[in-house]
């Protein structure tokens, strides 16, 4: 089995599958972070070389099933997994944690992508960006704002005069997030709808401080994708293919 990892759910799934007799699991990490969290199964790091490279790997390693437990915004990897399944005839299961939903007291504006999120910020905004390191380019031209971008890895160089970089690894605490938003004088929070408990504290903090949130919607799943919403369901799918008895 090939586990496309990089999320808390992938770590939980690796722990569960490591206990299943007769199931050989290899997890794959993109290599985006220098110190990824440990996994309970053997790990390969780095890309496959695109869709064709993933197909070659699946065939060479005689992979019986692919589980895509990548980040909900890793649309390209999910598309490659779906395509590899079609080309090789192997089943593909996409594990996606449920989206966040606005609650009473939230003030969300949902936008389709990061470029739209950048455009939605008013002139003079002081925004906290919980959108990941790769998102900085989308905000480079918003020099009329003051932005604080949090990433897991520290930036290799100054991002831009109007974008301050800070580091942090989830999970985060609501009170700590409130303190951070107050410290930077945030007027807005920008987030991607990743779902899960680890990154939710910034939204709870924004609600408590009555700050508007610009929420980037998830990219669509590949057409015809078989999707499950939790680790238990993913384990059941794997067992059905690899250990039916």
Image (tube, rainbow, N blue to C red):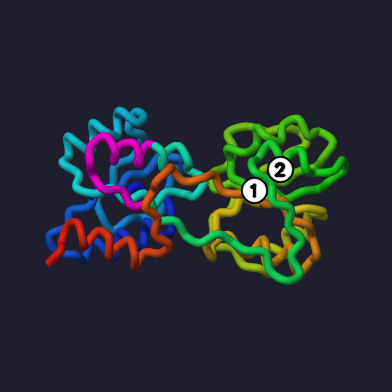
For residue 155, which quarter of the picture? top right
- To which residue does mark 1 refer? 216
Q: Nearer the viewer, residue 183 or 5?
A: 5
Quarter holding residue 244: bottom left
| Helix, strand or loop under label 1 | strand
How many numbered circles are shown? 2
Q: Nearer the viewer, residue 194 or 29?
A: 194
Residue 168 spot, x, y in % from top left: 58, 53
Measured from the top left, where is residue 71 in percent x and y? 47, 49
User: Quarter of the image holding residue 143?
Assistant: top right
N-term-proximal mark, 2 vs 1: 2
* Side (left or right) of 223 relative to 198: left
Q: Nearer the viewer, residue 208 or 236?
A: 236
Of helix, strand and loop, which mostly describes the magenta segment?
helix
Q: Is residue 235 magenta?
A: no
Q: Residue at x 39, y 48 (%)?
A: 225
Asked if disc 2 and disc 1 are in contact, CB closer than 8 Å, the reply is yes
Q: Which residues are magenta?
A: 80-93
What residue is drawn where x is 59% and y is 54%?
193
Whole-percent x, y for residue 212 in the image: 78, 57
Q: Tag 2's secondary structure?
A: helix
Residue located beneath label 2 in the image:
117
Please give the label number shown on residue 60.
Answer: none
Q: What quarter of the picture does the C terminus occupy?
A: bottom left
- Locate residue 40 relative to residue 162 in the image: left or right: left
Cα separation between marks 2 and 1: 7 Å
Does residue 31 lie above or below 14 as drawn?
above
132 w.r.t. 14: above or below: above
């Amino acid at each position: 089995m090939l586990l496309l990892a990089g999320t808390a759910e992938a770590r939980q799934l690796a722990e569960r599958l490591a206990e299943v007799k007769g199931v050989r699991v290899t997890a794959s990490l993109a290599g985006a972070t220098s110190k990824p969290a440990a996994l309970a199964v053997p790990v390969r790091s780095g890309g496959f070389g695109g869709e064709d490279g993933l197909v070659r790997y699946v065939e060479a390693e005689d992979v019986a099933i692919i589980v895509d437990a990548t980040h909900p915004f890793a649309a390209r990897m999910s598309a490659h997994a779906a395509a590899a399944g079609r080309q090789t005839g192997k089943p593909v299961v996409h594990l996606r944690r449920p989206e966040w939903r606005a609650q009473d007291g939230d003030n969300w504006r949902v936008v389709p992508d990061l470029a739209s999120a950048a455009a939605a910020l008013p002139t003079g905004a002081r925004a906290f960006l919980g959108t990941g390191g790769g998102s900085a380019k989308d905000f480079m031209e918003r020099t009329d704002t003051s932005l604080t971008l949090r990433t897991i890895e520290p930036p290799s160089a100054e991002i831009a005069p109007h974008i301050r970089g800070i580091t942090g690894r989830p999970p985060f605490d609501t009170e700590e997030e409130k303190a951070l938003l107050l410290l930077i004088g945030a007027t807005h929070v920008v987030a991607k709808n990743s779902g899960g408990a680890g990154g939710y504290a910034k939204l709870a903090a924004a609600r408590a401080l009555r700050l508007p949130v610009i929420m980037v919607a998830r990219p669509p799943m590949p057409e015809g994708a078989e999707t499950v919403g939790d680790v238990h369901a993913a384990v059941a799918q794997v067992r059905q293919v690899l250990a039916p008895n």
